[in-house]
Image (tube, rainbow, N blue to C red):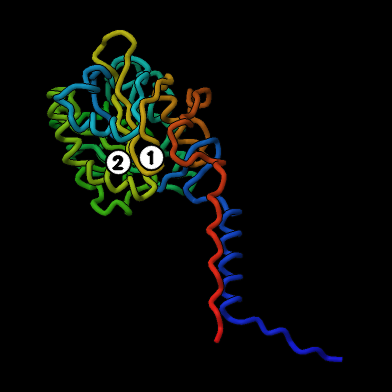
Amino acid sequence: MTGTPLRIPRPVLFMISILLLGALSTLAPSSAQAANGVPRPDHVVIVVFENTSESSIIGNPQAPYFNQLANTGANFTNAHAIEHPSQPNYLDLFSGSNQGVTDDSCPHTFSTANEGSQLLAAKLTFTGYSENLPAAGSTTCSSGNYARKHNPWANFTNIPAADNQPFTAFPTDFTHLPTVSWVVPNLCNDMHNCSIATGDTWLKAHLDAYAQWAKTHNSILITTFDENDGSGGNQIATIFNGQPVKTGNYSETISHFSVLRTIEDMYGLPHAGAAASATPITDIWATPTGAPPSAPRPVQPLPRHR
């Protein structure tokens, strides 16, 4: 005996499909999350300033934009550089080691693992942007207000020359940014040779547009310093801003190695040098990995048929 085929009204089929899609979405991992308690941003931009203590930045009326970032992002009140002078700290932040360099001498050549080479090996992207770099790929030690001692990727043979760019190449369409990029102002705008107010003005003029965009595009701006002014503790200002970031002051001790480790964990990279023993930053994220899924939307009544 052949039964009459069950005919399900189209509105009912539509609602069933919506419910199934919702259930599947709670099972699939978010593209904005990675393992190890950190997010997976679409883009990270790191900007590094020079030789200024944390107490000279946070609360200083000469640094209104730095303080705006601190008040709207994750402000670390116990962040520290590793050593003195400048160049070793850039190498620490980029590669987890000063590579045996303890001064600002130039040139140096290394082939060890670093943030950029790890990203490239993972089929992701990296570019460093240095203000006043005389030409893409340049390995000159100095040119006007540009100094290679503040450009660590220029020293590594496993970073292509094409990833060593002048700041004029920084995209205005931020969707074209690499996965991770560094921005290094010149010797005046990074506060090395000029005032805190000069650096503050430069930061707002050149990176506020990205900072605002990052709030709605799963991206992060990290603002930090290579070292302090030589006072005890080597404490520096370090601020994270962007959509994944939870606003507040954070008092845990962090260092350049902590920041490197956190970025490596974001993209599932190996750990370079001392980053392997550093603690990643896991408490500042607005949507931590492993958070329970959002409550399902209530089912709307089916439309009536006439």
Q: Residue at coordinates 32% horizontally, 14% vertically from top-left?
A: 234
Farthest residue in the right direction? 1
Q: Percent x, y for residue 68?
A: 23, 33
Residue under pointer 1? 159
Element on which disc 1 rests: loop
Residue at position x 31%, y 14% from top? 84
User: Which quadrant holds residue 186?
Assistant: top left
Indicate the quadrant where residue 194 lies: top left
User: How many labels, in total?
Assistant: 2
* First reached walking from the N terminus: tag 2 or tag 1: 1
Are there few (<14), some (14-19), or many (20+) residues within 10 Å of tag 2? many
Tell me residue 179's x, y (percent): 39, 46
* Circle 2 residue: 164
Judged left or right of residue 114, residue 85 is: left
- In this view, the residue in front, 43 or 244, is 244
Residue type at numbered disc 1: Ile
Give the vertical position of 256 relative to 207 (above or below): above
**Quadrant housing residue 55:** top left
Dot 2 amino acid type = Asn
